[in-house]
Image (cartoon, rainbow, N blue to C red):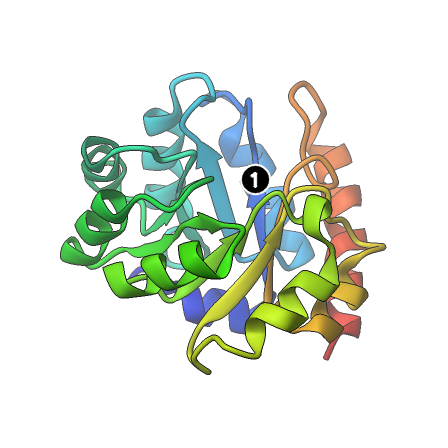
Amino acid sequence: MRLKLDDALAECPVVAIVRGVRPDEILDHAEALHAAGVRGVEVPLNSPDPLASIRMLAEAWGDRMTVGGGTVLSAASVEDVANAGGRIIVSPNTAPAVITRAVELQLDPAPGFSTPTEAFAALAAGARHLKLFPAVTFGPAHVKQIKAVLPAEAVVWAVGGVGAEQMADWWAAGARAFGIGGDLYRPGQSPAETAQKARRVVEAARALR
């Protein structure tokens, strides 16, 4: 059984963005993330050989972490991620074709949005997880205002410029998930560094509840 996105976020509301990771190192970093308590991993498709990394993650960790692709910009890429075993489809934009194809394949899309128009377009296409990106550009007050008109089942993520120190403000505004990149992983860092960063982020996430 693959771990579903909602179940992963219920354990820890953090998806690690491992942009730039290589297939030969992905499993060591995944082990460090999981040991710290992270239950979601996104491999951006502009990483080296990303589908290989997603396939390895899905095979080794798919029952304990929800895994998938980021920077997914086309329906064809959705299919590539699905064929590699990924469950989550994360995008920087709202592309109805990407969302629709993900839903058709029973995957979990998390499209990027910045305005109410984009948020409702994403919901109409079948998304339930909405990624405010880049979050740092808009601030927590933006989420608070948009949440007032979104349906209760919509899950807003704060992604882009959000780290352990900012999570409490975003949570108070209504964000219920976080995509975290540099505060968890940067290309070239060791698994030990990933573990240290992940413990800090997970500690901040646990304090939210």
Horizontal relation, residue 156 to residue 108: left or right: right
Pick the quarter of the image with the N terminus: bottom left
Local crowd size for mark 1, using a 10 Å CA cut-off: few (<14), some (14–19), many (≥20) = many
Judged from this view, the residue extending furthest toward the left is 104
Q: Nearer the viewer, residue 79 or 91?
A: 91
Horizontal relation, residue 55 to residue 167: left or right: left
Q: Nearer the viewer, residue 139 or 70?
A: 139
Three-letter amino acid code at the position of disc 1: Ile
Task: Please state the horizontal and vertical placement of residue 179, each as a whole percent of the image.
Answer: 59, 49
Q: Is residue 92 above or below residue 122?
A: above
Task: Please state the horizontal and vertical placement of residue 167, each as a whole percent of the image.
Answer: 76, 61
Residue designated by label 1: 17
Judged from this view, the residue extending furthest toward the bottom is 152
Instruction: Please give the count of numbered marks on the rendered protein.
Output: 1
Residue at the image position 23 percent from the left and 51 percent from the top: 102
Task: Please state the horizontal and vertical placement of residue 129, each as a whole percent of the image.
Answer: 43, 62
Pick the quarter of the image with the C terminus: bottom right
Asked which quadrant contains residue 193, the reply is top right
Asked which quadrant contains residue 51, the reply is top left
Residue at the image position 46 percent from the left and 83 percent from the top: 152
Judged from this view, the residue extending furthest toward the front is 117
Task: Please state the horizontal and vertical placement of residue 73, each as a whole percent of the image.
Answer: 33, 33
Asked which quadrant contains residue 126, the reply is bottom left
**Helix, strand or loop under label 1:** strand
Q: Is residue 120 above or below residue 182?
A: below
Q: Is residue 52 above or below residue 130?
A: above
Residue at the image position 27 percent from the left and 37 percent from the top: 81
